[in-house]
Amino acid sequence: MRTLIVGCGRVGASLARWLSAEGDDVTVVDASERPFSRLGEEFTGEMVLGSAVDEDVLRRAGVDRAEAFVAVTDSDTTNIMAAQLAKHVFGVKRVICRIYDPERQSIYADLGLETICPTTLGAEKVERFFQQAAPTPS
């Protein structure tokens, strides 16, 4: 699968390394060159320096050939804008973006964007923990 990942932080780099090891064709875009060091020597994909919301940068990264697009920068706004470009301008079929603000999740769903929110996932995990660990009344 051809996957374009924008954001080479912990999540983006980890996902890129895993997909690359699985034999996928992976390209990572980041606004800074330094995070690319997280990819390691085993990474066989491409690295593109530039803004995730710049159409020319996305074209250079091969967004027009991407089968999947993952936006995991540290900015909700950048992730949403990049995801919208990938889905609505370039026609990428499988697009997902990380957002931190759970209040925005339904808004983006209305725009047809798949999101993942670590804030919501973390809160739900803690809620389940407390529900399972609740003492039973005697």
Image (cartoon, helix red, strand yellow):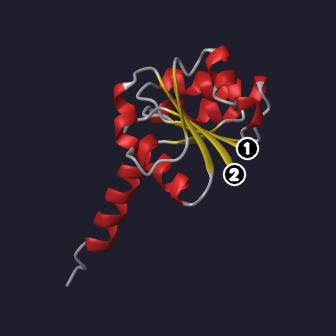
Rendered location of residue 5, percent (x, y):
56, 37
Q: Quadrant of the C terminus?
A: bottom left
Q: Does 124 sit left or right of 103 as displayed?
A: left
- Dot 1, crowdedness within 10 Å: few (<14), some or many (≥20)? some
Q: Residue at x 39, y 47 (%)?
A: 41
* Amino acid residing under circle 2: Met
**Crowding near the residue tagged with mark 2, few <14, some 14–19, many ≥20 C-alpha atoms within 10 Å:** few
Splitting the image into 4 quarters, where does residue 84 fall?
top right
Please tell me the numbered disc located at residue 67.
Answer: 1
Residue drawn where x is 49% and y is 55% of the image: 18
Instruction: Please tell me which residue is depicted at 44% across the width and 24% down the height of the picture.
Output: 75
Whether residue 33 is situated above or below residue 67 in the rendered picture = above
Q: Position of residue 71 (x, y in %)?
A: 55, 34
Q: Nearer the viewer, residue 118 or 110?
A: 118
Image position of 84 (left or right of 37):
right
Task: Name the residue type under label 1.
Answer: Glu
Residue under circle 2? 1
State yes or no: discs 2 and 1 in contact (Cβ < 8 Å). Answer: yes
Q: How far across and how far down the image is residue 51, in percent?
A: 53, 17
- Please state which of residues 115 and 137 is positioned toward the viewer in this rendering: 115
Name the mark on residue 57.
Answer: none
